[in-house]
Structures are given as structure tokens and as C-alpha cells.
Image: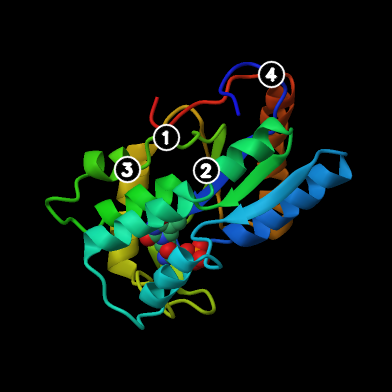
């Protein structure tokens, strides 16, 4: 496990509001990279398969209530429990395409506007995790995603809350983010995703240094 400069896989993260098409684009990117001979796997957070993930799932489907801080810490813990495996895969030259990551963790909690859960606090509990080499932000208004099928089934899928999430995501943007209009066709979006992702994968394989949150 190393943050130094040796050939490695890339950490590519998709972010955006609910129902913006992230999952479809993650799958298509993994398929494309594999067809090019790149070792790539898709992950998603929350990982609902672990015991922490099951608690998160109960919370998201509104079968359970949780204090906002506890929910935040569980989402972060759900990434921490995968940290070693993530680093092991990356150093073994596997590219990880991840459907949501720490950026969602910060944006969704910060959007709640709870005074003791500031943006800085939210970021602090993610320290120790690798930073994404590329964040592909699927840009779509809260109103447009709300019109999509399946919307409103889980906690957070409400237009006014999603608008606050979008603002919080904006505050997290840096030079590693690529903002892609998520309202086009699946194939058009995929071409744009490939154009930003492929050079990042090549740079990682050539030995670009892996960053840390929140350097
Ligand atoms: N979510 C996701 C958070 O609130 N914090 C996090 O750290 C992560 C990773 O969970 N509404 C929220 C965002 C989504 C929900 O996402 C589950 P998905 O991608 O619909 O399974």
C-alpha cells in the first residue's frame, strides 16, 4: 500500500444528486476500460452488504431513525472498512470506478444544516482515505432528476433537500472534478466520461501519485 509513485490503478468517482444516471455510467465506463485491457471494477457507497451497510440501508429506506451525526459517521465508517482493500486493489493496478464516495458523505450531511455538523467536521472524518484521481460530477437540476422513475422512494429524495445537496457539492469542487451535463443521451454522456477518464487511468498506470483526502 503506497501513496508513492509506482504504477497503480486509478480511483475514479461518480458523484451527483439522486437518480442522475451515475450507476449506468459507472457500468459503461468499467465495460469500456475492460475492453481496452484495463483491469477495472465497479464499487458503490454505501456498500449495503456489510453490517454497517445494512444499518445504513435501514436508515435510507426509513425503517430506522438515527441521529444525524451517527448516520454521518456510519457512512464514513462504511468507507473506512473498505480502505485497506481499496488501497490493495489500487496498488495492484486495478482501477476502481466508484458510484459515490466521501464527496457524497460531506455534501448530504452538510446539506442538513445541522450547526455541529459543519462542512469542516464532515470532511474531518474522511481523513485517511485516498482522494479520487477524478470526480465525474453528473450535473442535473433537482427538478429534472425528480421527474425520473423511482424518485422519492428513499430518504433525501426531495427536491428542496437535493437543491441544498447541489450547493454543497459546488463548494467541494476542485481541479480534479469534471462536470458533465447529465441530461444528454446515455451514449453522449458516456463519450464525455471516457474522454476525461481515460487519460487519468493512463496517468495512474504510468505512476502518478495517489492523493489523500483533503490535500
Ligand atoms: N449518501 C451516500 C449519503 O448520505 N452519504 C454518503 O456518504 C453516501 C455515500 O445515500 N441518497 C446518500 C446519497 C443517496 C443514498 O445512494 C444512497 P444511492 O447511490 O442511491 O444508492
Mark 4 to mark 1: distance in Å?
A: 20 Å
Q: Evaluate if marks 2 and 3 touch, with contact meaning CB atoms under 8 Å apart.
A: no
Asked if 47 appears above or below 82 in the picture, the reply is below
Q: Which residue is mark 4?
A: 6
Report the side of 184 relative to 37 (left or right): left
Q: Residue at x 41, y 45 (%)?
A: 103
Query: SS class of the residue under badge 3?
Result: loop
* Residue named by callout 2: 83
Q: Dots 1 and 2: beta carbons under 8 Å?
A: yes
**Viewer-proximal residue, 40 or 191?**
40
Picture residue at 29% right of the left edge, 38% below the top: 124
Q: Is residue 113 above or below residue 90?
A: below
Q: Where is 168 relative to 50, above or below?
A: above
| Mark pair 2, 3: CA separation | 13 Å
Q: Position of residue 67 (x, y in %)?
A: 21, 67
Residue 205 screen position, x and y as percent: 74, 25
Q: Which residue is mark 3?
A: 125
User: Where does the image place residue 132, in percent across and percent down from the top left?
Assistant: 53, 36
Amino acid at each position: 500500500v503506497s501513496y508513492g509513485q509506482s504504477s497503480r490503478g486509478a480511483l475514479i468517482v461518480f458523484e451527483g444528486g439522486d437518480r442522475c444516471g451515475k450507476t449506468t455510467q459507472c457500468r459503461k465506463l468499467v465495460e469500456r476500460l475492460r475492453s481496452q485491457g484495463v483491469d477495472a471494477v465497479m464499487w458503490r457507497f454505501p456498500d449495503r452488504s456489510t453490517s454497517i451497510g445494512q444499518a445504513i440501508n435501514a436508515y435510507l429506506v426509513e425503517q430506522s431513525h438515527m441521529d444525524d451525526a451517527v448516520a454521518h459517521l456510519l457512512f464514513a465508517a462504511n468507507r473506512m472498512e473498505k480502505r485497506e482493500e481499496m488501497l490493495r486493489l489500487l496498488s495492484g493496478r486495478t482501477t476502481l470506478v466508484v458510484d459515490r464516495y466521501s464527496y457524497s458523505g460531506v455534501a448530504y450531511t452538510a446539506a442538513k444544516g445541522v450547526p455541529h455538523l459543519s462542512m469542516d467536521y464532515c470532511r474531518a472524518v474522511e481523513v485517511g482515505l485516498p482522494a479520487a484521481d477524478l470526480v465525474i460530477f453528473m450535473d442535473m437540476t433537482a427538478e429534472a432528476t425528480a421527474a425520473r422513475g423511482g424518485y422519492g422512494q428513499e430518504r433525501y429524495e426531495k427536491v428542496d433537500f437535493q437543491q441544498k445537496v447541489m450547493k454543497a457539492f459546488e463548494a467541494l469542487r476542485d481541479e480534479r472534478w469534471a462536470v458533465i451535463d447529465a441530461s444528454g443521451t446515455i451514449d453522449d454522456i458516456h463519450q464525455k466520461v471516457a474522454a476525461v477518464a481515460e487519460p487519468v487511468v493512463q496517468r495512474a498506470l504510468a505512476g502518478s501519485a495517489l492523493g489523500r483526502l483533503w490535500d
